[in-house]
Image (cartoon, rainbow, N blue to C red):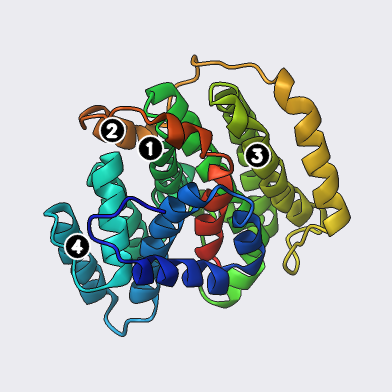
Amino acid sequence: MLVAEFATPADLAHCRQMIRQGSKSFHLASLLMPNLYRQHARALYGFCRMADDLVDHSETPAIAVAQLGKRLDAIYAGKPSDDPTDRAFADVVSRFQIPRAVPDALIEGFAWDAEGRSYQTFSDVTAYAVRVAGTVGVMMSLIMGERRPHVLARAIDLGVAMQFSNIARDVEEDARLGRVYVPEEWRGQGHQKAATRLVEEAEGLYARASAGIAMLPKNCRTSINSARLLYREIGLAARRQNHQGRATVPLARKLGLVASAIWETPWLRSSNTAPCLLEGQFLLDAVSQTHAPAPSAKGFTESVGWVVDMLITVEARKS
């Protein structure tokens, strides 16, 4: 169980139910994780999902964003509001010393969605992806006990690549809803070609993320690499069908990708030479300025599958 100062067993059960309802497939995957680790990840998921829903379903999104800021104030003051997700997330924040700047950035991404922000350049889209997905990678890494800047940089790469895959998959559906995430500077060539360029940009980030996988604890690497290959395939599938309709990956293909991950993971090579995305550097700066808790051996051994829960949270952004 999560070592809790604020959360009750009922609070943790509430977060578990949020995953079950929000993403059935990834909830099933999460059942394969060690119980202690699942509690930490579910607490993070619950707060992220609550915040997203609060902004999305509000008639006055700006007020909802302000409310979230006040709730974070209370969480970081050690006085979470009377809500199960706030109490559960307060325990995670306290135990793993998550800098306030990280969830603040996540909520800023929600605010950009609420205001219907237009993204003029590729850097603008990357900044958005850093906020709604790169932040999740950083927080999950901190839960795993990993705070080294070059490893966190690769976690940001992976989160951003996943969000690019999401955008490429949903470009047609988003356009019908009046949501456009491809940059304005690419739209002259049409949404389909612009989405294909986004898939190509994701390819480079997925490749860089593989170097980060090799720097993580050995018992995490195959799980993380499987997630990388599975999510990468979403973007590739969308490109194959020219971004028409919602791309899906058949079960047989998923199993093949997992087999590929099992085979190739021992051969991945680490590298700390690639810089962090400029749009994500502020997250690394925030972590470097925060006191690092003593590593927990138990935390490391029970961290298998942290990217699966990162996927749960990223997937919740589009469901």
Q: Are marks 4 and 1 in contact (CB under 8 Å)?
A: no
Judged by depth in the image, the label closer to the viewer, 4 or 1, is 1
Task: Name which residue type carries label 4.
Answer: Gly
Q: Which numbered disc covers residue 142?
A: 1
Q: CA distance from mark 4 to mark 1?
A: 21 Å
Q: Is 68 in front, or is 3? A: 3
Q: Secondary structure at mark 2?
A: helix
Residue that mark 4 sits on: 69
SS at badge 4 = helix
Q: Is there CB contact under 8 Å for labels 4 and 3?
A: no
- Earlier along the polypeptide chain: callout 2 or callout 1? 1
Q: Please, what is the three-letter code of the amino acid marked with disc 1?
A: Leu
Which mark sits nearer the N-terminus, 2 or 3?
3
Q: Is residue 313 visible?
A: yes
Q: Residue at x 20, y 29 (%)?
A: 289
Q: Position of residue 249 (x, y in %)?
A: 79, 57
Residue identified by numbered label 3: 223
Name the residue that disc number 2 marks.
287
